[in-house]
Image: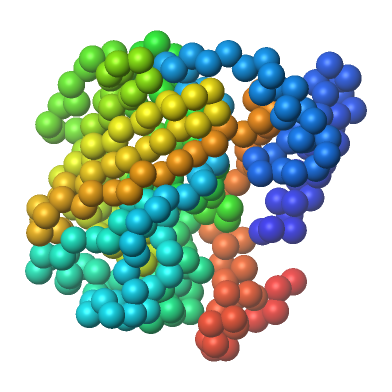
């Protein structure tokens, strides 16, 4: 999958560069070439700060706070996770623990004590299911498209596909009888000059909160605060409330995102999770790396 995608990206970039001099160069988030640095500096000098304008591509700078460690009685060892800015999860309910224990993670960010070879795991991403939210927020750059009535968040995670989340700004109320969605149903409103408040629920409970398999129910509620600090800085904090899965609300740490410059010339990779190619990659790379030779074969 990676080799085919890389070839496609190279072809598309080449076509864009040759098609019209007016298009100029295109860049990808996190690039550090001298050319991109200069273009970023030129772009930053021209930026106008509109606190209600979140358009652009944002890349996480991480979040602070304590993380679970080797003394955790539920887990054992632990790696850092972007979920909730690294804030420790509250105790699980009996329902939540049953779901959590049944999950067999295989993602690279999952904790070693829980990780299995992909062929033995049950992470939805192994079947090219969507990441869901808020897992998608930590998977890679997120692009914001904005109109007066709606914000679209375009999530782009390497190898896990692209997905879109809608945040309605037109004052509507989400009906109680809507079907759950992978990225939930979200409404937002502005408070003050630089703060967007988003409330959401009706999340498809098949989605994992992160690669470790933290669960949620369809009734999970997320309260998010987007603080647009300046033209290039966005801070996000969220609180997860799901009494079916957790004994108390999960209060997240602040997560900081930086606008990727040059704005307008920086683009996200096109990423799709193709089931046939994902299975081929599992058999040729992930399974043998995890010691599962029974479900392994060389990549062709």
Q: Residue furthest top?
A: 148
In what quadrant of the picture does the C terminus appear?
Answer: bottom right
Above or below for 293 versus 77? below
Say which residue appears at 76% left-offset and 35% top-offset. Answer: 37
Query: In the depicted view, which residue is nearer to us: 112 or 12?
Result: 112
Residue 33 visible within the image: yes
Above or below for 87 versus 146? below
Q: Quadrant of residue 51?
A: top left
Residue 155 visible within the image: no
Say which residue appears at 43% left-offset and 64% top-offset. Answer: 80
Residue 163, given in percent of the width and then of the height, sits at: 47, 40
Residue 117, given in percent of the width and then of the height, sits at: 48, 79
Residue 73, given in percent of the width and then of the height, sits at: 22, 80
Say which residue appears at 47% left-offset and 50% top-offset. Answer: 62
Q: Is residue 144 left or right of residue 98?
A: right
Q: How is the image coloured?
A: rainbow
Above or below for 161 versus 120? above
Q: Is residue 84 left or right of residue 137?
A: left
Q: Quadrant of residue 20?
A: top right
């Amino acid at each position: 999958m990676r080799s085919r995608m890389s070839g496609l990206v190279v072809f598309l970039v080449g076509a864009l560069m040759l098609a019209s001099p007016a298009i100029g160069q295109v860049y990808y988030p996190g690039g550090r070439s001298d050319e991109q640095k200069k273009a970023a500096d030129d772009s930053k000098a021209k930026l106008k700060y509109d606190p209600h304008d979140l358009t652009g591509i944002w890349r996480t700078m991480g979040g602070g706070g304590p993380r679970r460690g080797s003394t955790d009685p539920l887990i054992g060892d632990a790696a850092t996770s972007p979920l909730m800015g690294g804030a420790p999860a509250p105790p699980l309910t009996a329902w939540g623990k049953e779901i959590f224990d049944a999950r067999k993670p295989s993602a690279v960010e999952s904790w070693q004590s829980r990780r299995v070879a992909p062929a033995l795991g049950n992470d939805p991403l192994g079947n090219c299911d969507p990441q869901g939210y808020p897992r998608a927020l930590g998977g890679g750059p997120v692009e914001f498209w904005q109109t007066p009535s709606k914000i679209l968040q375009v999530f782009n995670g390497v190898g896990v596909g692209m997905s879109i989340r809608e945040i309605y700004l037109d004052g509507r109320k989400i009906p109680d009888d809507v079907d759950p969605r992978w990225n939930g149903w979200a409404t937002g409103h502005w408070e003050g000059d630089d703060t967007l408040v988003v409330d959401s629920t009706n999340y498809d409970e098949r989605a994992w909160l992160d690669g470790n398999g933290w669960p949620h129910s369809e009734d999970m509620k997320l309260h998010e605060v987007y603080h647009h600090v300046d033209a290039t800085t966005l801070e996000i904090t969220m609180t997860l409330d799901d009494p079916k899965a957790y004994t108390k609300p999960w209060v997240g740490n602040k997560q900081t995102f930086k606008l990727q410059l040059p704005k307008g010339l920086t683009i996200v990779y096109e990423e799709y999770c193709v089931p046939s190619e994902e299975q081929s990659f599992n058999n040729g790379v992930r399974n043998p790396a995890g010691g599962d030779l029974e479900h392994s074969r060389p990549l062709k």
